[in-house]
Each structure stands twice: as structure tokens, then as C-alpha cells.
Amino acid sequence: MLELQVLIKIMGGCSNQRVLLLFPVMVMMVVLLLGTSPSRAELQKLKHTPRKADHQPLNILVVGDWGRQGTYNQSSVAYQMGVVGEKQNIDFVISTGDNFYDDGLTGVDDPAFYDSFVNIYTAPSLQKIWYNVLGNHDYRGDVEAQLSPILTQKDSRWVCMRSFILQAGIVEFFFVDTTPFRDDYFTDPGEHTYDWSGVLPREAYLSELLKDVDYALGQSKAKWKIVVGHHTIKSAGHHGNTVEVEQQLLPILKARNVDAYINGHDHCLEHIVDTESGIHFLTSGGGSKAWKGDIKPWNKQELKLYYDGQGFMTVQITESKADIVFYDIYGKVLHTWTLSKKLNNAA
Ligand SMILES: [Zn+2]
């Protein structure tokens, strides 16, 4: 660890710094990708090897709805993410999508990749892998560009796939591509153009995806199962619930006893506990532009936090508990919650 810190200081702003730091993780990911069978009904698996000794907590930071060339306070949120990321000694970052506004990337050479990502999240603590899903705004650009390994060559932190599993010891994250679920993007796109290459025919894509997620959750032996998607399932925010995802994905999450669903899309910070299923719905969509005062009525017993400003979330996970913390743009803690899991209890 000391060597790493020294290395960071010596390397300063050198572009090779991240490559060197992340090299072991990259090798592991390449090995796993090569070793993973592309057979159907199996989502691609990535393994995140913890930097710390066993039984140490896993620390992650979650941000969503961010890429605006630093505007709408994106840079200020990024600064606090760096401060909190340092304190929490985070292992990696999860992005809940809408990575580049307004219309995704134009291609792998779009300068927005630098202006909204590389040159914004510059803090040493954020030089970790970023696991990204796509949001609806990303689908308005060149989707293949965001999925391209060329971006990972430009910045080795960047990992973006449509749907995948991230195995991180006691916890597994199931990233789900939620944008193709929304009917109106297909039937009533208005002035927007969506890049559906790789998604059509839509019905087959969605039914295969749901089967894959169900199978993967059923196979998982992880203590904690957390699902990540861009769209809301339960939200009191501007967009509210995403009916299609609620109808099609939520029954699987309930049947497979997932602990939490993490999303963006609504530009707020929010925590809803579904009293029926016990699933925690966590919205971290405050990476840049927020929507002040945009809230719908919700059962007060379920709505534990609704914050209509910018910010982000951290989760610290051990075998027995997961500590969730939401922060505003000043780094002030807005809300904390602890999920407990009985030891020796089946996951
Ligand atoms: Zn969105």
C-alpha cells in the first residue's frame, strides 16, 4: 500500500499511472473474460479481487446521471466523491448510467469522454475501476462506443457492458440493461433517436435478459445480492416507477431475495424500503443536474430519504451488515442505514 501511495506521488499526473495501478485487476478481468463461455443464458462474469485482506469490508461509491463537462455542479460532486472516496478507501465505483449528456457519445473519439469523465474524476481515490451501466441518454448516442475496449485503453478505469455480473467476494452485483424495457422509447421517441443495434429483436432480447438474470441470481451463492440498473423500479421522483421494469424485473428480484436495487434516472438521492418484499431501493442519480422540489407523494413508512439535490452514495459491506450513506455536494451526510444479515443464514 505504501509503495502504491509513493508510486502515485512519483507519477503525479502521468497518464500511465492508472494503467500501472490497475494492471493486476485488468489482467484478472481479461483472464476471466477469455475463460467465460459465451453460451446463452449466462451473463458475463467479472471478478473484482479485493485489494485488502480477507474479512475486510468492501467499500463502494455509487454515482449516476453525471456527464455534463463539469457543469451543473458535476465538478463539485466529483470533488466530494474524491474526499469521501479517500476516507472510505473505496474499492471501486459504480455508475448507474446516463454517463454522457445529452446524447451519449458520438463515437470512441468523442472528446466528452475526457471532458465529462477522465478530466473530471481526477482525485487519487477515484482512480479505481468504474463499473458502468447504460442509461437512456447513453442510448441516444453511439452505444457501441461506450462498450468499446478502446475507451478502456484511453482510461483503464472504464468498464461498461450492457448486462453483467460482478463478483466481489461476499457480494455479487447484477448489472441489468434497463433502457430497452421502456415502451415509449420505441413507440414515441419524439425528436430523440435511439441506437438499438445489438438489442433487436427487442422481445427476444428482453426475454433472454430476464431469463439470464433469473438464472444468475438463482445460481449465486453470494451472501449479498445487489442488482444495479439505470431506471427506477420504485421512486417518488420526477420519473416515478418504471412500470415495465417493475412488472418484468421486480418479480424476479423478489423471488430471488435480492437485498437491494440500485438505480439512477431520477436526479435525486432516495431510499425506499419496500415493506412487502423488504427490498431496499436506492436511487443515486445526483451526479450533476438535480431537479429541486420534484417529488411525488409516497408512503412515509417506506420513504426513508428523498433529497432533491446533488450528491452520491457509499456502501460498506461486511458478511453481517451493509452500511449505506448518502452525501450531499458539501460532503454532509444526509442519511445512513444499516442492512443486517444473520451470519450462517442462507443468502
Ligand atoms: Zn435516465
Image (cartoon, rainbow, N blue to C red):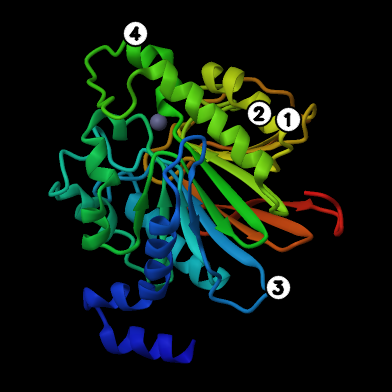
Looking at the picture, which amino acid does disc 2 mark? Answer: Ile
Residue at disc 3, CB closer than 8 Å to ligand 1: no
What residue is at 50 percent from the left and 22 percent from the top?
Answer: 207
Image: 259 above or below 114 = above
Residue at disc 2, CB closer than 8 Å to ligand 1: no
Q: Are marks 2 and 3 in contact (CB under 8 Å)?
A: no
Q: Are marks 2 and 1 in contact (CB under 8 Å)?
A: yes
The numbered mark, 1 or 4, whose residue comes first in the sequence reads: 4
144 sits to left or right of 43: left
The numbered mark, 2 or 4, whose residue comes first in the sequence reads: 4
- In the picture of the structure, the residue carrying the numbered disc 3 is 55
- State the image quarter where residue 7 is shown: bottom left
What mark, if any, has residue 187 been given in the picture?
4
What residue is at 17 percent from the left and 47 percent from the top?
Answer: 108
Q: Cα distance, mark 2 to mark 4?
A: 26 Å
What residue is at 53 percent from the left and 17 percent from the top?
Answer: 244
Q: Cα distance, mark 3 to mark 4?
A: 49 Å
Residue 314: image x %, image y %?
Answer: 57, 56
Q: Nearer the viewer, mark 2 or mark 3?
A: 2
- In the picture of the structure, the residue carrying the numbered disc 2 is 252
Q: Nearer the viewer, mark 3 or mark 1?
A: 1
- In the picture of the structure, the residue carrying the numbered disc 1 is 255
Relative depth, front residue between 266 and 291: 266
Looking at the picture, which amino acid does disc 1 mark? Answer: Ala
Looking at the picture, which amino acid does disc 3 mark? Answer: His
The numbered mark, 2 or 3, whose residue comes first in the sequence reads: 3
Which class describes the residues within 10 Å of circle 3: few (<14), some (14-19), or many (20+)?
Answer: few
Secondary structure at numbered mark 3: loop
Relative depth, front residue between 216 and 289: 216
Residue 94: image x %, image y %?
Answer: 47, 52
